[in-house]
Amino acid sequence: MTISDSRPERGSAASVVRARNLLKRFGTKTVIDDLDLDMPRGGCYGLLGPNGAGKTTLLRMLLGHVLPDAGTLEVLGEPVPAAARSVRARIGIVPQDDNLDPDFTVMENLRIYAGYFPQPARRPLTPWLESLLEFVSLHERATDRIQSLSGGMRRRLVIARALVNDPELLILDEPTTGLDPQVRHLIWAKLRELIKKGSTILLTTHYMEEAERLCDRLAIVDQGRILAEDTPKTLIAQRVEPSVIELRIRGAGHRASADDVPAEPTGLPEAISRHARIERIDETWHCHTHHPQRVLEHLPRYPEIEYLHRPANLEDVFLNLTGRELRD
Amino acid sequence: MNPTSIPRRSIPRRWHIPRLHPAAAFAVWRRNALVWRRLFVSSLVFHFGEPLLYLIGIGYGLGRFIDGMEGMDGISYLSFFASGLVASSTMMSTSYEATYSAYTRMVPQKTYDGIIATPVEVDDIVAGEMLWCATKGCMAGASLLIVATLIGAFAGFEALLCIPILLLIGLAFSGLALAITATAPSYDYFSYYMTLFITPMFILCGVFYPISSMPAFVQGLIQVLPLTHAVALVRPIVTGAALENPILHIAILIAFAFVGFYVAAILIRRRFIL
């Protein structure tokens, strides 16, 4: 028995999540601001946004744990919060911080959690739970206590736990935050495996790489609104110039004192700005352009400038839409 | 399009009457029972050792000087005190479980956060917790009951008939304690509850002496406290005396259980449903 091998076609509603005019205020702060969302069945959908953008609040709303002040919400075709209980039986959740039960072993955690669902996903239960542990490569730790697991193992166990009810929709809130690159890649591989087998995944992240690698569609969220929504490729194509040239004065950053600002190369900004949108971040200039050659041809005259020419990526889209000021 | 009206309902919406799913509440009970099974030796010493010490020290030691005095319902002081102690240790054990232990599950361990992601509702958690804390109290009371029966403090093994009453006593106290736990900012908060509410009941509600020996106005106050009614049920059952007003006492304990459950459910919803 393997995960998702004989998944029956349950429901065929086009959207797994359908939100209209969702609104939520905490005191005077509007955390979800007149938000509309249509998330298709199948594949991976990403909510990308800075800290405090409203991503987690939106996820908790899908579970019925945050009650909207206005608007309508349907998850898997059922109204939420009215049918939240029945919706939660059909979805799996990987929360931002691990809330594994420290009083139990790895296997007991799955078994106890399975007991919270009215009907077990698969019978007999034990081989099903064993297959889940095998899926996240924890089958050899089945009888270990939670305290003995590393952060990456715990996160994998939380993912296995989220699968105990064989969910139609798997929701992950920043699944790889705080994990080392090895574990991150392993988790991405597991999620891709689930997607390939037909699962629908909704995840929040602020890692561009995660969003680009995993998500078929993305919504960029900030201040409780969706600023843009499309495939990663289309977002990059439509929301920013295709090329970025990052310029930097050689030796900048090795200054003797704060007053020792390197002289601006005479005439360069004027020359480039006709062909590029220039953003200055500290001592680096980001030149966003449709015509990289026209920018590059100026550079040989300025030997003190070092540069990096790269295609635009999701991070450029993200920063362009959400701005660069800090969010903490 | 902007939403035209924002209904203001943040308070009433969390006040709805609980709708329970017994299987879900039982799953919560079962989780706690499985943890207990693992730690059961140490919890036995804690919940059982202390009352046993009281029973021997005060029941035997002090009893020698008191036996035969008026107002003891014609029973030995050991029987009198042991029967009160069965009720009060049920209260104590339930109250500790529903404050310190439940808080540990609710806040630092985030056990409830994990559970509410499943079809189990907050109300089911409250019901399961109440039932568990009552079970724990019932076990503490029952083990004392068995020991007291073995040393001959009670009439005979028909004393064991009061075990269902112990469960009811546990339910009456667990709802109150969970309501306190729901509003607790930290563990320190519980010492107020214990010192200002639980300990006074232990001292005033007829565990050590008949409440008829108190001044009239204090007796009136004592009559509204749940432990008084718990003792009034347990003592006649275990000593083989006739019950007075059993329906009244049972009804009062049931009322405490239901009101406690409802208040605890509303307060714990506020912690988890925003």
Image (cartoon, coloured by chain):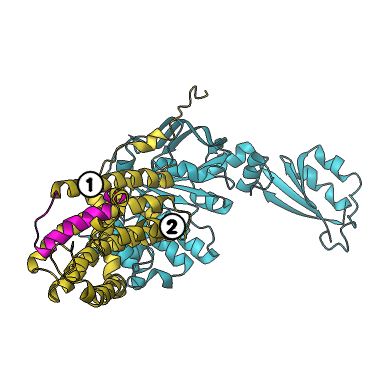
Give the amino acid type for the residue marked by disc 1 in the picture. Answer: Ile
Query: Where does the image place residue B28, in percent across and percent down from the top left?
Result: 28, 56
Q: In this rendered view, identify the residue nearer to me: B189 or B55.
A: B55
Residue identified by numbered label 1: B252
Is B231 within the magenta?
A: yes
Residue identified by numbered label 2: B192
Q: Residue at x 43, y 50 (%)?
A: B183
Q: Find numbered disc 2 in the image and state the secondary structure of the residue it sits on.
A: helix
Numbered range of the magenta stretch? B221-245
Subunit ID for the residue under disc 2 = B
Task: Report whether A286 appears left or right of B162.
Answer: right
Q: Residues within 10 Å of mark 2 (few under 14, many from 20)?
A: few
Which tint is chain B? Answer: yellow
Whether residue B60 is situated above or below residue A53 in the rendered picture: below
Task: Report whether A315 appears left or right of A149.
Answer: right
Q: Find numbered disc 1 in the image and state the secondary structure of the residue it sits on.
A: helix
> Image quarter for residue A76?
top left
Using the rendered image, report if marks 2 and 1 lie on a common chain.
Answer: yes
Subunit ID for the residue under disc 1 = B
Q: Residues within 10 Å of mark 1 (few under 14, many from 20)?
A: some
Query: Where does the image place residue A277, in percent across and percent down from the top left?
Result: 75, 39
Give the amino acid type for the residue marked by disc 2 in the picture. Answer: Tyr
What secondary structure prevails in the magenta region? helix
Query: Where does the image place residue A62, in percent across and percent down from the top left?
Result: 41, 41
Label the cyan chain with its letter: A
